[in-house]
Structures are given as C-alpha cells and as structure tokens.
Image (cartoon, rainbow, N blue to C red):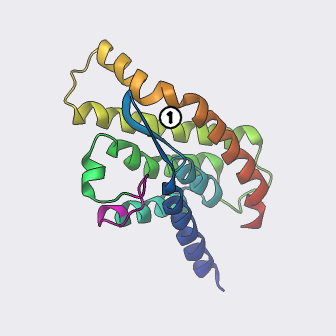
Amino acid sequence: MNESQKRTFTTLGFATLIAASAFFKHNLSFSPVPIVIQNMFPIFAGCMLGSIQGAASCGIVLALGMVGLPVFSGFTGGTLIIYGPTGGFLVGYFIAALIAGAIAGKPKSNHKHPVLRIFSAAIVGFLIIYITGSLHFIRYFELPLSKETFASVFEKCIKPFILGDCIKAAVVTILTISLKKYL
C-alpha cells in the first residue's frame, strides 16, 4: 500500500469512527444541546492525522449527514440538523479538527509529542466547537447580542459540558500519545 492509499484509508477510517460515535445522545431538559461523545472524535482525528486529514474526516461525515445518512448524534441526518439549533456545533467539528491538528502537529513530524501540546490542542478544539455552536445558536433563535444573551447561552450551551469535555480532552490526549506512533 503506497502513502496516498494509507492516508485515504486512515481518513476514511476516522470518518467511520466519527459517524459510528453518533450512537450516544443524551438530551437535557434545560437545553436543546445534547450530551454526546461524537464531539471528541473530530478532535481526536485532528490530533492523530494532522490538520488536513483530520478536517477531511469531518468533512466526509458532514457531507454524508447533509445528504441524509444517519451520522449525526442519535443517528440523525439531513440538512435540517445543520440548519437547526445545534448545527453550529457540527460545523465546529470541521474547524476543531483543522485547528487541533495544526496544534498537535503532523503524524510523522515527531513521535514524541508532549502531553501538554496534545491536551492544549484538544482543549482548543472543544473551545472552537463551543464558539461555533453558540454563535449559530444565537443566530438560529435570533437572540439580541447582549451580555444577558451571552450569559444565557453560556448556561445552556457551554457550562453543562465543560467537565465532560475536559475528560474527553484527557482521553484524546492519552489515545493520541499512545497510538500516534503507529500511524
């Protein structure tokens, strides 16, 4: 298998992993944003594969979801999900993989990635998902741009997820450091 085929295979493999992680979705009574594990895997793809391949994995999943395949959380799909209140979080997956991958570095650039660098990449990835998701949430509900709006959106779209996403960032770090040498 040549290098191009290996890159294609790993990109498709991570796209499959992202899509398969859609099985878990826990709705919250106070927020339209569910608890998911899917948001961890685009960041993992970026950290493992690098910026371009990680984002490509997410792009594949977004494209499949937009044509209706059930690859979004709770095994849903379709453009209505992207345009709905949580669509910005999904778009954030692509950007998060791109940026986390840039911070983490290319797969073969250095097999000794420090823990802090990978963990920082993961945290930045989650921050990007929060920002894109929250901004889309504000736009979707046509909320006024005010201190109160940002406080309310923080309470509904970010605060309930911080602890879990920090744990996911630690898992991404451990997995990346453990597995990156095999790519």
70 displayed left or right of 118: left
Instruction: Tell me the residue that label 1 is attached to.
Output: 127
Q: Nearer the viewer, residue 144 or 115?
A: 144
Write down the quadrant of residue 79 in the picture: bottom left
| Vertical relation: 105 (above or below) 132 | below
Answer few, some or many: residues within 10 Å of disc 1's Cα (few below 14, many 20 plus, some between 14 and 19): some
Indicate the quadrant containing the N terminus: top left, top right, bottom left or bottom right. Answer: bottom right
* Magenta span main SS: loop
Q: Nearer the viewer, residue 38 or 132?
A: 38
Report if residue 72 lies within the magenta region.
yes
| Vertical relation: 147 (above or below) 103 | above
How many marks on residues? 1
Extreme residue in the front direction: 29
* Tag 1: amino acid: Leu
Numbered range of the magenta stretch? 65-75
Measured as percent of width and height from the top left, residue 67 is found at 29, 67
Extreme residue in the bottom direction: 1
State the SS at label 1.
helix
| Vertical relation: 28 (above or below) 41 | above
Measured as percent of width and height from the top left, residue 47 is found at 63, 52
Q: Residue at x 60, y 29 (%)?
A: 163
Measured as percent of width and height from the top left, residue 82 is found at 30, 51
Indicate the quadrant containing the C terminus: top left, top right, bottom left or bottom right. Answer: bottom right
Q: Residue at x 19, y 29 (%)?
A: 142
Report if residue 154 lies within the magenta region.
no
Measured as percent of width and height from the top left, residue 139 is found at 24, 34
Q: Residue at x 52, y 62 (%)?
A: 20
